[in-house]
């Protein structure tokens, strides 16, 4: 009888741990989905930053920059991380949009970032879209 009670207590303890783990996973996946849905807004803010940089109205430019930086800081505090695009193409982190023949560049070197990529707690939200160097064709 005592052994059975100990076994039931152990099973219940394992059940509680499993439920807690499942809840944490569901919360993480929910947060990842929200962050993924906010990425287009972040992209549009970056486009706004580019277009407003040539504006004559410096107060407007400063205001947009402040809102963008505040938004980005909030996303980063929640766990959003930008994927590094320095160096060589990584198929697990980058998506090739175009490959260009580039003399003096090692094939696979990232030349330009078309769209930034992001992760959240090692969950890929969006790969970085990049332009890479390829070997020049022999004539």
Image: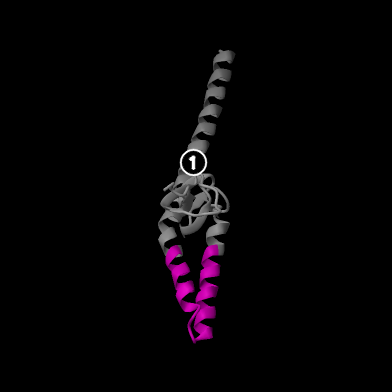
Residue lying at the far bottom of the rendered structure: 56
Q: Is residue 5 visible?
A: yes
Depth check, front residue: 40 or 112: 112
Mark 1 residue crowding within 10 angstroms, few (<14) / some (14–19) / many (20+): few
Question: Which residue is located at x 53 percent, y 74 percent?
Answer: 65
Q: Report x, y in % for residue 123.
A: 49, 45
Residue lying at the far front of the rendered structure: 139
Depth check, front residue: 105 or 85: 105
Q: Is residue 115 visible?
A: no
* Residue stretch rendered in magenta on the structure: 43-72
Q: Is residue 6 magenta?
A: no
Q: Is residue 18 above or below residue 3?
A: below
Q: Main secondary structure of the magenta part?
A: helix
Q: Report x, y in % for residue 45.
A: 46, 69
Residue 36 quadrant: bottom left
State the residue position of label 1: 25
- Name the image quarter holding the N terminus: top right
| Picture mark count | 1
Depth check, front residue: 107 or 72: 107
Q: Report x, y in % for residue 134.
A: 47, 49
Q: Is residue 65 magenta?
A: yes
Q: Is residue 40 above or below residue 134?
A: below
């Amino acid at each position: 009888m005592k052994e059975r009670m100990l076994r039931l207590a152990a099973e219940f303890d394992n059940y509680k741990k499993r439920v807690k783990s499942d809840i944490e996973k569901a919360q993480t996946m929910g947060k990842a989905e929200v962050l993924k849905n906010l990425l287009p807004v972040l992209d549009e803010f970056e486009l706004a930053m580019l277009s407003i940089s040539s504006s004559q109205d410096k107060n407007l430019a400063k205001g947009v920059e402040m809102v963008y930086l505040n938004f980005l800081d909030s996303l980063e505090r929640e766990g959003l991380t930008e994927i590094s695009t320095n160096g060589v193409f990584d198929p697990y982190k980058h998506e090739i949009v175009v490959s260009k023949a580039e003399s003096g560049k090692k094939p696979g070197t990232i030349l330009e970032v078309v769209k930034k990529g992001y992760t959240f707690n090692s969950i890929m939200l969006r790969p970085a879209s990049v332009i890479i160097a390829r070997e020049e064709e022999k004539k």
